[in-house]
Image (cartoon, coloured by chain):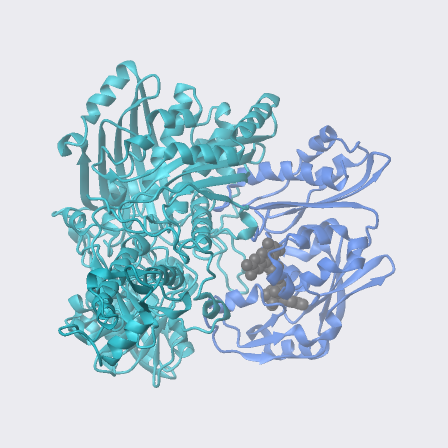
Amino acid sequence: MIPTQFEYLAPTSVEDALAALAQHGDEAKVIAGGQSLLPVLRMRLNAPEVVIDLGGIEGLRGVREDGDALVIGAMTTHHAVLHDPLVGQHAALLVKAEHQLADAQIRHRGTIGGALAHADPAGDLGAPSLALGAEFVIAGPGGTRTVAADDFFVDLFETAIAEGELLTEIRVPKHTGWGAHYEKFVRVAHQWPIVAVAAAVRVEGGTIAEARVGLTNMGSTPLRARAVEEALVGQPATEDAVATAAARAAEGTNPPSDLNGAADYRTHLAKVLTRRAVLAAAGA
Amino acid sequence: MTAVEDRPDTSAKEIGRDRRRKEDQRLITGRTRWTDNIALPGMLHMAMVRSPFAHARIVSIDTEAAKASENVVTVLTGADLGEAQGVCINAWAITTDQVAPTHVPMPTDRVAFAGETVAVVVARTMAAARDAAELVDVEYDELPAALDLKKSAADEVLAHPDLGTNKSAFWKFDSEEAGTGGNVDQAIEKARGDGIVIEREYRQQRLIPAFMEPRSTVVDPTGEQITMWSATQIPHILRFALAATTGVPESKIRVIAPDVGGGFGGKLQQTPEEMITFAVARRLGKPVKYTETRSESLMTAHHGRDQWQKLTLSAEKDGTVTGLKVELTADLGAYVSLVGGGVPVLGAFMFNAIYKFPAYQFNCQTVLTNKTWTDAYRGAGRPEATYAIERLMDELAAEVGVDPLVVREKNWITHEEFPFTTVAGLEYDTGNYEAATEKAKASFGYDDLRAEQKRRREAGDRIQLGIGVSTFTEMCGLAPSRVLGQLNYGAGGWEYASVRMLATGKVEITTGTSAHGQGHETAFSQIVADRLGVAFEDVEILHGDTQVSHRGLDTYGSRSLVVGGEALVRAADKVIEKAKPIAAHLLEASVDDIEFSAGRFGVRGTDQGLAMADIAMAAFAAHNLPDGVEASLDSDATYDPVNFNYPHGTHLCAMEVDTETGGVLMRKYTCVDDIGTVINPMIVEGQVHGGLAQGIAQALWEEAVYDDSGTLVSGSFVDYLLPTSADTISFDVQHNSTASTTNTLGTKGVGEAGTIASTPAVVNAVVDAIRHLGINDIQMPCTPERVWRAIHDVGGSGTTDTEGAAMPHFDESTGMQGTTDRTDGAS
Ligand SMILES: Cc1cc2nc3c(=O)[nH]c(=O)nc-3n(C[C@H](O)[C@H](O)[C@H](O)COP(=O)(O)OP(=O)(O)OC[C@H]3O[C@@H](n4cnc5c(N)ncnc54)[C@H](O)[C@@H]3O)c2cc1C
């Protein structure tokens, strides 16, 4: 179907994009890969008067190292993140999640920044970015600020990005040598997860030294399974020990009920998938 | 029902070849014309204004703002179009007292399902039409909606208050009354005393045909004939319906189905949108186009299935079946559509399947609701029947304590018993269930998989293995006109073909079948090439245009080859007969001495002869024809089948069930189908693959879900789960052919076989994997959640209804209203 008419702007710098946002206020929508925005426009669920395309801003693409962190430009496509050697080496969890995100066509168009800014609680990148303790670099009229992952996801489709601001970079602390796994539960391959669990663990001599676990689609935002993380530390990477910790996966969650599953089923899945994700991440 | 004697020449060179499809180059490269690609000078575009309510009175429609919108030509309502819009016909009043609301394409006073059109915007561009459609202000007075099928059958809320009931028709077949078998109630009563009675209730969920090309219609009223292009399976029936309900003479209407991107029964319809486009074009005197969006397609193109099946099977203690009683409740949706009223009854003759039931009774109550209307969907009536009986045979085997194949073998018709008259009164011509099953078992590795299943059970593995069987048959090749008459159907079931011999020896064929993905152009060319001894490349198949192929009953019910192909063979044979006297004359021989073989007319006992092309040229020049012989070889034939056609097969499926999550995974799928003579193995394989995927999808993924207010929540492909190649495995597809005797070529239909057979094989496998945990049913689709609930006994035991809410993936700030219940958590 055809979206309503809008004006199309294609700035080539973040400054120009911010200026355009400032000028058009809430009549404007930013478009990245368009994989979430275009369906909305085509179904006429929204009718912005101005669409600001970030595709022409070269500086927002690519992955670089900055000391202990990787810096991923917001406009880096899922495909590029998936195949980036730095990400593979230092943030394997992201690769595991990107690998299962949608399908090849969508991964070529959709961007990491667009996906995270969109903040779909069923989106595959929120839980890994929480688990990895990512930081979000947000540019606005008054300059740039950095928001921790724990503060970034505010509610259903709502992030710390305010009106007039842009997400420019995602900074991911290096987790070199950590084991990682993304356990995604779906009915058909191209689906958003019914529930998914992102796990990164550092195992020392058979014992879990550090663990980070993120949950997808267990509430109105991606969630950290802190109770599980705490319970895992110091435990052997064995089925029993991990299962005991994973039994706490649903603590503090508020999963939805929909045609893919009721809340109690999701609660059950979260525990099972957490156990599987942690064991796989630990290489057990 | 007679057998056809002369068998085809088995030395034939085209039949049986893996010819690449002629039509694919243009279809795959996009160098073709779908209806939506058609652009005519001065053409206008339409957008529909649709009801958001399942049931509501239309209080007022304000079109002023839309009319004033840029590039809008007009906005029309049902009242504006009046009787010129015609009606959508109900061609199958299965009983004389069938209750059916009048189906006006655009109602004026009341809407009966969410998505029904109440106004149409006509504009110079598609975008302008869509923009203005949002400006049409309709005031509705919402009415209570009849949504739940069982409650609707009890008339709790009326879908059409004026009718006084939701019950449309009750149809019954009883073998005792028909004289084809015994009394079923007695058989069941007896079994209650000394045998086995299996009683089950199965749900056939509502499905959406989901063809690839959304429906589209263009109407050009500027010529002497009004021309309609439409993405339809049924150009001929559509022309008839347009003429019959609008008063425009049939001779003034031309319907063209250009290349059509799939249908699966979903385009076996005379749609409101076609009628509205026709009426608007006539009214404005200008070409008009309407193309639906995918969302509109999912919401308003007809749906399929949607039944409750109450089943009672009786048997002796050893598993010998003695009776089968079927009580169906079938959801027609808001209207009794073209053949929708009769679709459940197409299953009436198939519940007994390949088994020798001595007594059988089929009862069907069709019910009106305020949902999208249902009609044919791949298999139409027969998948439902096959599902029920094949599930029951597995249940019977479990009750007797034997392998599911053993109980089937005990009861099926053996190959020596053909032709066999069934308890439903059909005469099955040929088949060999034993051979197909043996071959399937071997290829599947049946015994090894059973051994693995045993090991996993004993070890209490997290992953359990199940094996599902489906030894299906179906009736296809619709249909003997006489039988259709007995069933009160509004038309016949014959098919038409003509052969035009061109001067240069090339051949044009017209067929009344209307391909929309099946590959007729290739398969029919192969048949003609062999029959007339001409090159495959020299045959052109023309179809889908009432001016070119003026007679026909179109494509559905696996009929094109077994009925249309037979008409083609007969027309070709007439060409040969017409050519013989000319050949004899030119060769100065007696007609009786002329023999036709491999494209050559020879004189018996000599080496003299002429090719088909020579005779074609001679007939064209007409310089030297025998007296009284017309200067044309062209011939046609109309063939009315004497019997249905009965493909069958043994399908075996292995499924792994993760007992912890309820997740299911297909491990192996083997099918050995008997579809008689295979014209083109590659096309057949494609039909089987696609059919399997659709049948498996009913078992595992697809379901049209409505919420409590009658809104379709699985209204996009995000929530209506179609499988892709990533979700299916490589199927093991084989054949065991016994030639059919219902047509000259010995063919059997294959268009629906995979869909009909596979659904029960998959569900049987899922249930088999966890039967030892005390489970005997999982409602379709077998979602992980249902399987988990059954295993862990957490409510619903595998038969809970699907939650009427979709996941929202597009946010409020971007405008997407999700319906998911997120705040209360568990519910
Ligand atoms: C069929 C389908 C299946 C999918 N399956 C999955 C899946 O399984 N898992 C999954 O995680 N995702 C899935 N997605 C979504 C996919 O990940 C999208 O790429 C992502 O949601 C949006 O990224 P985008 O670059 O396309 O953003 P867009 O659609 O262009 O934008 C999305 C939103 O973010 C805003 N935005 C974009 N960039 C910025 C920025 N730099 N600063 C501020 N705001 C910004 C936009 O204004 C818009 O509101 C699927 C999408 C489709 C169409």
Q: Residue at 41% x, 34% y: name it.
A: B435
Residue extending farthest bottom: B41
Horizontal side, residue B455 vs residue B317: left or right = right
Q: Position of residue A242 (x, y in %)?
A: 72, 33
Choose top left, top right, bottom left or bottom right for residue A125: bottom right
**The chain in cyan:** B
Q: How many numbered discs, if any?
A: 0
Return the residue nearer the eye: B166 or B172.
B172
Return the residue nearer the eye: A144 or B567.
B567
The vertical placement of B572 against B702, above or below, is below
Q: Position of residue A263 (x, y in %)?
A: 53, 41
For the question of whether residue B760 can be seen, the reply is yes
Q: Position of residue B709 (x, y in %)?
A: 36, 51
The vertical placement of A245 against B346, above or below, is above
Horizontal side, residue A67 vs residue B330: left or right = right
Return the residue nearer the eye: B716 or B491.
B491
Name the quadrant of the C terminus of chain A: top right
Residue extending farthest front: B606
Horizontal side, residue B478 vs residue B215: left or right = left
Q: Residue at 24% x, 57% y: name it.
A: B338
Q: Position of residue B372 (x, y in %)?
A: 32, 55
**The chain in blue:** A
Choose top left, top right, bottom left or bottom right for residue B661: top right
The vertical placement of B554 against A198, above or below, is below
Quadrant of the image where one finds ligand 1: bottom right
